[in-house]
Amino acid sequence: MNTKNNLCESIRHCAYQHGFDLCHFSRPEISGKDRKALDNWVGSNMHADMAWMAEESRLERRKEPNSMMDDVQTVISLAMRHAPPPYSLEHANNASNKGIIASYAHGVDYHDVMKKRLKALARDLDKLLGEHEQRVYVDTAPVLEHALAASAGLGWQGKHTLTIHRQQGSWMMLGELFTSANIPVDNPSNEHCGSCTACMDVCPTKAIVAPYVVDANLCISYLTIEYKGFIPYELRPLMGNHIYGCDDCQAICPWNNKAKTPDTDLLTPRGENILPELAMLLHLDEQDFRERFRKSPVKRTGRAAFLRNVCIAMGNSGDIEFTPLLLKALYDGEHLIRGHAIWALSVLHRLHHIDGFIEKLIELKKKEENNDVLKEIKAILSPK
Ligand code: SF4
Ligand code: SF4
């Protein structure tokens, strides 16, 4: 083995010791194809409400990784695997009085774990590489992480746009370490989706509008986590019981069939986040919510948006037993929760008839001050 390979292997060894499962190297360059894909995606407004994605300066930084710091020579792409969902897609979808939380969020917040591990790796690199500048990134920075991971040979971007490794599948989170050290790079990954379209076919909202293109406006991950407004009417029934993120396109992917469950430590799933009872969740007040999801990524979404999702799942369940809880939610201080509780009750009312529901709406209409909630009420009292 020559000295160059020794350096890569030493860095990989350190990365594995700090809990990373994959570690690959690339130059800070984004291919013309990936730049064009990003421009088309943003140009078609597929970034939805994530306005920061379309900001000129951030867009340029995404396309020019070497603008992230002075004299960056190498990008180290790192992956940390997490356990796949411990149930089948069918089982989760049929458990309609329970909510589906994406598997990466079953344990503690990976951002915190990843950041700590990246910083520990950075300290080791200071010793290994001598004088060099470096920065670490997890998710929030304008870094095209899947494109960089593919050019570093960590895996290819599947038609669902996530990174897939041939042996380890796609249940993993990515982070990056940019350094001014010139480290030998890996060969880019080849693409192995072939003629498969399973992820496109299974997507409940048909958000994968073309191979390798996900329209965030339609994606349940975006809608349940990032989006903080009223969910479009036509998408609510399609969301089923997804209350935080969505695993469907990964769960169906054949490359995940053989992926072994990793020996995770910090990311170990917590039982209470695996198909939690919807009824328990709608009981959470602000303080309960903060305590219940204290170290979980779910806390980032906030109580209002999370319970909005819970209300939609309750409506989609068709379960009349949720009526008393939803009626109580009509008086919640958060308009997002009141509005979606109205919608959920209207679904249950259509199926079972809820005594006094229309009268209740007429009474609420007189007092409600929020225009979006009023719109929900009017949509039921005076449908077009
Ligand atoms: S995360 Fe869910 S909604 Fe989004 S593309 Fe995948 S299957 Fe579709
Ligand atoms: S489900 Fe099929 S098309 Fe989609 S990412 Fe996996 S291999 Fe590719």
Image: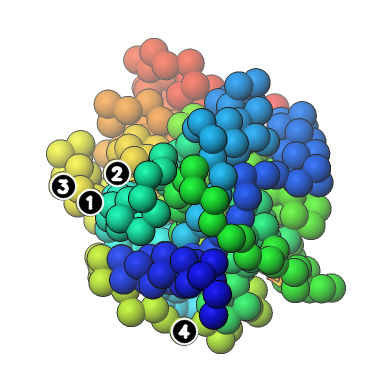
Q: Do the residues labelled 4 and 3 touch (CB within 8 Å)?
A: no
4 or 3: mark nearer the eye: 4
Q: How far apart are marks 1 and 2 (CA)?
A: 8 Å
Residue under label 1? 295
Kind of residue at badge 3: Glu
Kind of residue at badge 4: Lys
Q: Distance between the residues labelled 3 and 2?
A: 9 Å
Residue under label 3? 291
Can residue 250 be seen here? The reply is: no
Name the spot of residue 350 as percent of width and height, x first: 54, 48
Can residue 363 be seen here? The reply is: yes
Q: Quadrant of the C terminus?
A: top right
Of 66 and 205, nearer the camera is 66
Mark 1 vs ligand 1: CB below 8 Å: no
Name the spot of residue 254 as percent of width and height, x first: 65, 79
Give the residue displayed 39% in from the left and 78% down from the top.
Answer: 262
Residue 187: mark in rendering: none
Give the residue displayed 77% in from the left and 29% down from the top.
Answer: 43
Q: How far apart are marks 4 and 1 (CA)?
A: 26 Å
Q: Quadrant of the N terminus?
A: bottom right
Residue under label 4? 260
Residue under label 2? 299
- Check disc 2 and report its element: helix, strand or loop: helix
